[in-house]
Amino acid sequence: MRKKILAVVAATVITTLAFTGCGKSNESKSGSDKGVTGEINVISREENSGTRGAFVELMGIVDENDNDITTQTAEVTNSTSVMLSTVAQNEKAIGYVSLGSLSTDVKALKVDGVEATTDNIKAGKYKVARPFNLAYQDGKLTKLDEDFIKYIMSDEGQKIVDKEGYISVDSEGSYKASKLKGKITLAGSTSVAPLMDVLKDAYTAINPDVTIEIQESGSSAGIQSAIEGATEIGMSSRELKDEEVSKLVSKQIAMDGIAVIVNKNCAAGRNLRQRADRHRQEKGGRNCGHCRPHQISFHITSPKTVCRLGDGFIPVKFRYPDPRLFFP
C-alpha cells in the first residue's frame, strides 16, 4: 500500500511538470500563461547509486518483481554534485538528491504538500527518507575502525549529523579520544561521503595520528568492496539487500531525506495554481471536475504510456490536474 501511495506521489510530481511546462511564464493580455514547452529532461543516478535504489523503492518505481523501471530516456549522472549541476543548468530538468546535499542552485518540490525538511522527516510527515549505513564484515573491524564508528555514534558525532542538515539517530554516549594510530579506508555512497568528510575532520582533530581515506564509488560498489575485503567499511545510502545481509553487518549512523529537485526557474506549480484559480473564478467560484480539490490527479498505467511532454520516472497518464498536490 505504501509503495502504491508513493507511486502516485511520484507520478503527480512529474506529470504536473509535464502538463504546465518548466521555465519562465508569460501572462498574455487575455490572462492565459504560457510556460516553456517541450520534453521534460529526467535526470537520474547510476544503477549502483544508493540514492537511486532508495528513491525507486520509496516511490514504487519498480515492476511486480521489484525491478527498477526508471525510464530509459533518463539522463544518468554518476554523483550528487553532477546531479545538482545538471538540474541547475537545465530549465526543463527534474531529478532527485540527498536532502543533506541540497543547494540553493536548485529548487526542491513539495511531496504531497509537505516540504523536504529535517523537521518534517522527524515528524514523519515527509515520507521520502532513507538510512545512511556503514557496512562491514562481522568480527573483521580493527580497534581503530571500531573507535571511529564509536565516535560517529557518540553525542559529539550525532551533533555533527544534525548540524550538517541530516537526521541524527540515538547516540551511544560521550566520546573520549583514544589516541590510536593508523589508517581507515571507507568506500561507497556519494551521498554519505559529504557527511563522512566532516566526521573524519572532527575525529582526526582529536586523534591526530589517524588517517582516514574516503573513496566515493556508489553504495553498491562500496558494499561489494567491504564484502571482498578491499576496504574495511562500506558506505551505503540504502538498506542492504538480502544477499548482502548474509555477508555484512549494517550500522545506521543517520537518516536522510531525498528531495525531488527542479531548476530554479521552473514555474510548474505557479502556472498550475494560476490556471486553476482562474478556472474556478470563471465557474463562479465553484469546483468542477477539472479542479476538484481532493481528486487524485493521476493514475499508473501501462509502461508504454507517456505523459504529454515526455517520459517521467515512471509511466503515467495525465487525467485531471489537482493544483494543490505539488507546488515548488
Image (cartoon, rainbow, N blue to C red):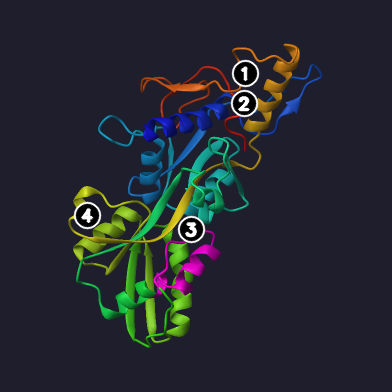
- Secondary structure of the residue carrying tag 4 is helix
Give whichever of 108, 305 is nearer the camera: 108
User: Against 189, is 48 above or below?
Assistant: above
Chain part drawn in magenta: 151-172
Foreground mark, 2 or 3? 3
Question: Please, what is the three-letter code of the amino acid marked with disc 4?
Answer: Val
Query: Residue 249: x, y in percent?
Result: 24, 62
Tag 1 near tag 3, CB within 8 Å:
no
The CA distance from mark 4 to mark 3 is 24 Å
Q: Which numbered disc, 2 or 3, marks the residue that appears first in the sequence?
A: 3
User: What's under tag 3, amino acid-wise?
Assistant: Ile
- What SS does tag 3 mark? loop
Label 2 to label 3: alpha-carbon separation: 31 Å
Residue 167 numbered tag = 3
Amino acid type, mark 1: Cys
The secondary element bearing badge 2 is classed as loop
Q: Earlier in the sequence, mark 2 or mark 4?
A: 4
As measured in the structure, the alpha-carbon distance from the residue carrying label 1 to the one carrying label 2 is 7 Å
- Residue topped by disc 1: 291
Q: In the shown orientation, is residue 223 left or right of residue 277?
A: left
Residue at point 71%, 17% (across, down): 280
Dot 3, crowdedness within 10 Å: few (<14), some or many (≥20)? many
